[in-house]
Image (spheres, coloured by chain):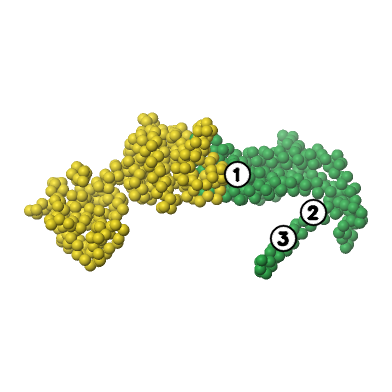
Amino acid sequence: MNWGAAAWLGLRYAVAIAALIVFLFPLYWLVVTAMKTPEEVLTYPPVWWPATPQFKSFEILLERETLWAIGNSFIVAVLSMALAMALGTMSAYALARSGFGGRFFAASALASRLVPPVLLALLAVLAFGRFGWAGSLVTLVAVLTVFNLPYVMWMMRGYFRDVPVALEETALVAGLTRRQLPVMVAWPIVRGGFFATAAFTFVLAWNELAFALVLADEGATTLPVLLAEVGTGPEAWGGVAALCLAAIAPVIVALAVMHGRLARTLSLGLVRD
Amino acid sequence: MANVSISGLTKSVGRVRVLKNIDLAIQAGEFCVVVGPAGSGKSMLLRTLAGLESADAGTITFDGEAVNDLMPRDRNVALVPQAPVLFPTLSVFENIAFGLRTKGLARAEIIKRVEEASTLVDLPERLSRSVRGLTAGECQKIALAQAIARDALLHLFDEPLSRLDGVRREPIRAALKQLHQEKEMTIVYVTQDHMEAMNLADRIVLLRDGAVEQQGTPIELFERPTSRFVAGFFGALKMNFLTGTIARDEAGPAVRLANGGMSVPLPPNRLPQNIADGTSVILGLRPEHMARAVRVSPPDGTMRYEAEIELLQPTGPRVCATFRMGGEPVVAELQAHDVSAPGETVAIDINLKRATLFDAETEKTLSPEYVASSDSAA
């Protein structure tokens, strides 16, 4: 290896390591904060590693309220993700093949994202209040499903459009019915994208605060809502950090899933002329 | 294998009429080649036969049964599309076997057919590999294998060799013709290549702007073109076209060439009686129908012409010699030893019995009946 190549490699590693430090610092800070005593949390210069690591802060994770919130978050995130994926994938196939919506699809799909979520949440409270449904988990699932649906449709439409029409025609001539096409031809190709989208949709729902804060009553509190309400101050910070770690864990798992699939989807490279 | 009949087939895409009132009858077991320039509607005709496009008007029948409203799978056709796309998640083997699996064939039968088909198209790679990273030519071979592995009523090939280079094309073309001779297959084969059409076809259908210009056996289209377009389309060497007018004298009818006033006598009965003197015509002479004079006097129906050679383009055993007749350049195909250098004067016998006359205005052949009857044995 010559000097130029070595320098280039060194530079690339230096940049990568710098980026890694920037991205991993918050995670590190959460972990050490959770292990600090209340006195160590706010001192300056900061304590980089607690003198005697404490694990008392993690006890908050075993409180009934916390477990309840984690459970709620899971129910809301999984159900709304599953519903949004099911409905969104089917409509995305139709959109991709019919061309319905055309140029306006982008604008209409993004429209709901242009409005502050709190505003939509308030409207949802009014609407569901009529039926006496405001505040329940069902309501939250329904609203998040609708809110995430455009994202799923947007992503999946793109994946379906990458499935060549000519491939479906080949399959039709080779003996498939039109109804078999989405499952037999498109699915194996979009599968990677589907799981990546599902993972991201899960994360969106899992982290969602505005709707959960406005819509959910006490029994339906989710983890982000609990985090927002747990309070501040030197005594509370350790607990907040522990809760944050609990909130991040599924996201990291989801990202790991997404990363593998995404890489595969991107490298799939359809075979065409 | 099926008798295919197409009548009054019309198809428009947007405002463009891609197929105009097409009538065709393809016999069971026939190798029918549809040929024509780009944009003449060849692919659309094939896609309509496959059921991927619906006809605006007209009927398509397979063995007498109308298939217009049938989905592709119910028509039982095999198709190699113009730009084949493979299933990226399947292996080469599974791509070829796709149309066999949907028909529920037994495992052993599928393996046998896939292997036969892949040998025929000369797929050297192992069949278990993924189709990712294959070249366009290999993808086309796989698509071709997929189609010929099937027992379809009708096999449709849309330029199936276009992505292979010339050297690799020849053996597969020969294998395809061999396969057609051995198996009972009805084939409709689309190509832009007039030589490929001549090579393969039992019957050629020449399309022009979405309409059938002429159909018949390869030799009919070559020797008895019904229009200047057909005459110009076929032939390894392009037909010479000379403009002139009809002039009758004591010796009989002749074509007086527009440039130079030279007169080309027409053999007896060559011209229908109803064509008046002074009619503008185009005289079509094939380079293959000219030869260096060997006898003392020219044979019957032949005109001897003292040609001053301007350009020589050897092709190996033969040479294309350019000279002028009435000021117009004319190409003759001679034996390589007939002429040694440009500037030489060579006596060339032009076989006028095999010349074709076109109406200068309509560019249609004058009296094709005569052409059809008198010289077909020659």
What residue lies at 73% left-to-right and 63% top-to-bottom? A14
- Where residue A194 appears, as percent x and y from the top left, is 64, 43
Colour used to depict chain B in the structure image: yellow
Q: Secondary structure at mark 1?
A: helix
Of label 2 and label 1, which has the lower sequence position? 2
Of label 3 and label 1, which has the lower sequence position? 3
- Residue located beneath label 2 in the image: A27
Q: Amino acid at mark 3?
A: Ala
Q: Secondary structure at mark 3?
A: helix
- Residue located beneath label 1 in the image: A190
Q: Secondary structure at mark 2?
A: helix
Given the image, what chain letter belongs to the residue carrying mark 3? Answer: A
Residue with the most extreme bottom position: A3
Q: Residues within 10 Å of mark 2 (few under 14, many from 20)?
A: some
What residue lies at 30% left-to-right and 50% top-to-bottom? B234
Q: Quadrant of residue B185?
A: top left
Q: Amino acid at mark 2?
A: Leu
Q: Nearer the viewer's eye, disc 3 or disc 1?
A: 3
- Residue located beneath label 3 in the image: A16
